[in-house]
Image (tube, grey):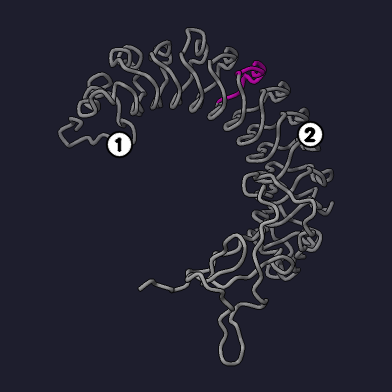
Amino acid sequence: MADHTPPPNPPLSDEHENEAGQSQIEIHAHTHIEAGGRKSTDGQSSAPLVNSSGWDGKLRMPPRNAVLTNPEALSDPDYSDPEAPPVEQIEADEDLLDDYPLDTEDIDLVHCRISSLVALKLERFTNAKRLCLRQNAIQSIALTPNLGETLEELDLYDNLISHIKGLDDIKNLRSLDLSFNKIKHIKNVNHLRSLKELYFVQNRISKIENLDGLENLTMIELGANRIREIENLETLHTLHELWLGKNKITEIKGLSSLTSLKLLDLKSNRLTTITGLESLSNLEELYVSHNGITEISPASLANNLKLRVLDLSNNQISHLANIGHLKELEEVWASSNKLADFREVERELADKEHLETVYFEMNPLQLASPALYRNKVRLALPQIKQIDASKLITPRHGLRV
């Protein structure tokens, strides 16, 4: 006999929860939606289950036929229905901040369905240094001017912001996080001369622009956007970390002035070669995994003598070459390439005193003889402490196993 226990109703996300009062179609858990109407699990027409008093539990509306009028929304993550009714604005209740002393320095309101910054009445908090409003429904940045003297960290991660406005008076910011929003253009931030960290992860940015004036910036995160070219970074002389993973970049260029750069992340782009790093003599970490790189040329890393971490995983590299001069290497990640020769591994890495971790799995040198692979790596590189995800154990008598 079939089990007709109703499955739990899927929870509404916060983004959709705001719209429940206008557009939610409530359907009993027993039912199954098919094209052409509403049916029960046994294929017969079904009315909502009610008790003797006519009360129908959580159902507050009569059943309706569910018709998907905008099927394109299923395949387009950026789809926005121009005919849709406006999202219900849930004003932030002042009570959200009632428990905060007026001299507080740290305000943290995560996942509170806030859509209005004005309703928070932040002007009360004259000493606020950190304002965290992650995972809300904020569409515009409207901060009271009196925060301009004190606010150092503003976190608006995972909201609905599409335009950067409202920061004119906030001049002492040191950290600004606008990740997971709907921003298409970098604007109105170059007056933030104290800014050290700037986050734009997972937006809709296609061009690096308008960063001149950020002379104290040490880190910028632009991962998971739509950037095709590295450009307009010439004035960021103090930059230490540049994160550009998961974009559409085809060439490493435009970095010659970033002589202080220590970390460069270009994972999951469209690179085929490693170039443009000649002036980055202070570079310590390079991440270029998940690209289409076929070789490490003699010029690729010739001047990057301070490299400690080199991530080449998931490329098309056939020979481990031209990294023997990198004496400071501590980690080499080269999984999922076309490396087949243990002699190249020994030649390039055996003399690296600081080398502790190597990844070579899913290469021909591992796939051809998986039972012998780890022993061969240990013979070629006796100084290492970790092969792939497994650390080597050092027994008391001093011999690794």
Toward the viewer: 216 or 380? 380
Quadrant of the rendered structure where residue 202 is?
top right
- Residue 24 percent across, percent down from the top left: 68, 66
Dot 2: what SS?
loop
Q: Earlier in the sequence, mark 2 or mark 1?
A: 2
Question: Majority secondary structure of the magenta segment?
Answer: loop
Residue at the (71%, 63%) spot, across then down: 19
The kind of secondary structure element at disc 1 is: strand
Is 397 on the left or on the right of 23, as rendered? left
Q: Which quadrant would the C terminus be assigned to in this image? A: top left
Relative to residue 149, is residue 229 drawn left or right?
Answer: left
**Disc 1 marks which amino acid?**
Ser
Query: Which residue position holds label 2?
Result: 190
Seen in the picture, residue 150 relative to 63 is either above or below; the reply is: above
Magenta highlight range = 251-262
Identified at 45% across, 26% down, the residue is: 311
Q: Report which residue position mark 1 lands on.
A: 390
Q: Does the rendering let one see residue 95?
A: yes
The residue shown at (30%, 26%) is 384
Q: Residue furthest left?
A: 397
Would you call the spot at circle 1 few (<14 residues within 10 Å), some (14-19), or many (20 or more)? few
Q: Position of residue 366 (x, y in %)?
A: 28, 25
Vertical comparison of 332 with 54: above or below = above
The three-letter amino acid code for the residue at tag 2 is Asn
Instruction: From the top left corner, tell me how far across and down residue 338 is, in percent.
Output: 37, 19
Q: Nearer the viewer, residue 336 or 7?
A: 7
Frontmost residue, 162 versus 102: 162
Q: CA distance from mark 2 to mark 1?
A: 45 Å
- Would you say residue 356 is visible in this rendering? no
Give how far across and how far down residue 109 sits, in percent.
66, 60
Relative to residue 137, is residue 331 drawn left or right?
left
